[in-house]
Image (tube, rainbow, N blue to C red):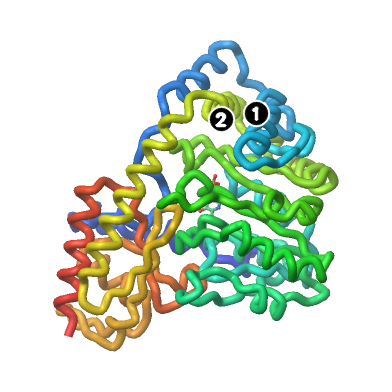
Amino acid sequence: TFRKSAALSRIQPAATIAITQKARDLRAEGHDIISLSIGEPDFDTPDHVKAAAAEAMARGETKYPPINGIPELRRAIADKFARENGLDYAPSQTIVSTGGKQVIANALLATLDAGDEVVIPAPYWVSYTQMVEMTGAVPVVVQTEAEDGFLLTPAALEAAITPKTRWLILNSPSNPTGAVYSADDLRALAGVLERHPNVWVLSDDMYEHLIYGGTPFATMAAATPAMKDRTLTMNGVSKAYAMTGWRIGYAAGPQPLIDAMALAQGQVTSGAAQPSQWAALAALTGPQDALELQRAAFEQRRDLVVARLNAIPGMDCPTPPGAFYVFPSCAAFLGRTTPGGKRLETDEDFCMALMEEGGVATVHGAAFGQSPFFRVSYAASEAELTEATGRIAAFCAALT
Ligand code: PLP
């Protein structure tokens, strides 16, 4: 008989993916569902990026890559960090992996032992806690407050650290809240970490280019040079260049950490797919004008969704400075009943009923470690967003 490992018994599939699948199933049964549950840009990968992959394949770049990534891409990554973030990394201090996800998995696998602790501010991206659990280490989840813009405070960080803490995971702009840490916010957190040299920082900068209203982007290693020796700066092409399916993420950090991550990667995947690496090279070194067009489109969508949600009596939706999600509170709707007779006790009840009776798929806050909220992805067309927010309004109005 089949027996699952203890490591895998501790984890669950991502709620975001499970809900998106449920929306697909309902649609296949003939239900009309708008899915605002997935974190994927609806733009297409730029043509020059696709062409670079095709050219690489035609040249025969279809063999095993070097484990850490092709040298051309690692050079481009070092250049990117220098140009955009003022960070000085040698190409040898970079690594290319199969999506941003594998960068994080490698870093945790390379450093964590059973009983180690990782501080994760909630609401968090769903995979952090699960990846930590897989290693046998312990996720230490720290709640943040909507009034603080869902940002971790220095006092909350201080309280969460123990001698067993190995990492603090920071994600700015944040999935799911869209919160953004300023350089000053990061320096305040670094002030705490100064007293705790056992704690390293994993800076997940996946949404760097999706930031609005002139908010400047900041990252720990640049904001606090003293932290650079214990920070992994992670990024990728999935969200910035509409390349989720190419599976390329990257990072730069202290050499011993990068070497340990390469050791893990070498035994698990041998490295990221060659044609995808050439495509990522074209994305990082080619024309960047699509970035600004997408950013401007997302900003307009954000404003549309925030305005339309806040027009719903009882809905409270802050305006996030980054990413492509809003994270409104559904507190005002709990304790009420749907026309279908469902009593809404939790944010999960709210989202399930909204999908089944309202025709809009969103993800409950509990999946990201904080209730009672829900995440709406605005990576969809304005027409879809207008229709979806109209449906949410009708759903809320029909509650008794
Ligand atoms: N980090 C965050 C915060 C994300 O939202 C995602 C994707 O959803 C990732 C990392 C993983 O990125 P990739 O698709 O490149 O693996």
Total labels drawn: 2
Q: Are marks 1 and 2 in contact (CB under 8 Å)?
A: yes
| Closer to us: 348 or 314 | 314
Q: Determine the image quadrant of residue 66.
A: top right
**Residue 98 percent location from the top left of the image:** 61, 40
Could you tell me residue 21's position as x and y percent?
37, 56
Secondary structure of residue under mark 2: helix
Instruction: Count neighbours of disc 2 (C-alpha within 10 A) and say few if under 14, some if 14 to 19, many if 20 or more.
Output: many
Ligand 1 within 8 angstroms of badge 2 C-beta: no
Q: Which residue is at 72% across, 56% downward?
A: 108
Q: Which residue is mark 2?
A: 284
The structure residue drawn at horizontal position 39% and vertical position 70%, both measured from the top left corner, is 364
Q: Is residue 132 above or below residue 102?
A: below
Q: Give 39 or 134, whichever is nearer the viewer.
A: 39
| Quadrant occupied by the N terminus | bottom right
Answer yes or no: is residue 332 visible.
yes
- Left or right of 314? Residue 249 is right
Q: Say which residue label 1 marks.
A: 76
Q: Residue at x 28, y 74 (%)?
A: 315
Left of 209 or right of it: where is 342? left
Residue 20: percent from left, percent from top:
37, 56
Q: Quadrant of the C terminus?
A: bottom left
Amino acid type at image mark 2:
Leu
Mark 1 to mark 2: distance in Å?
7 Å
Say which quarter of the image contains residue 9.
bottom right
> What number is the disc on residue 392?
none
Q: Which amino acid does the dot numbered 1 rest on?
A: Ala
User: Which residue corresponds to the image point at 70% horizontal and 77% vertical from the top-left?
Assistant: 160
Q: Secondary structure at mark 1?
A: helix
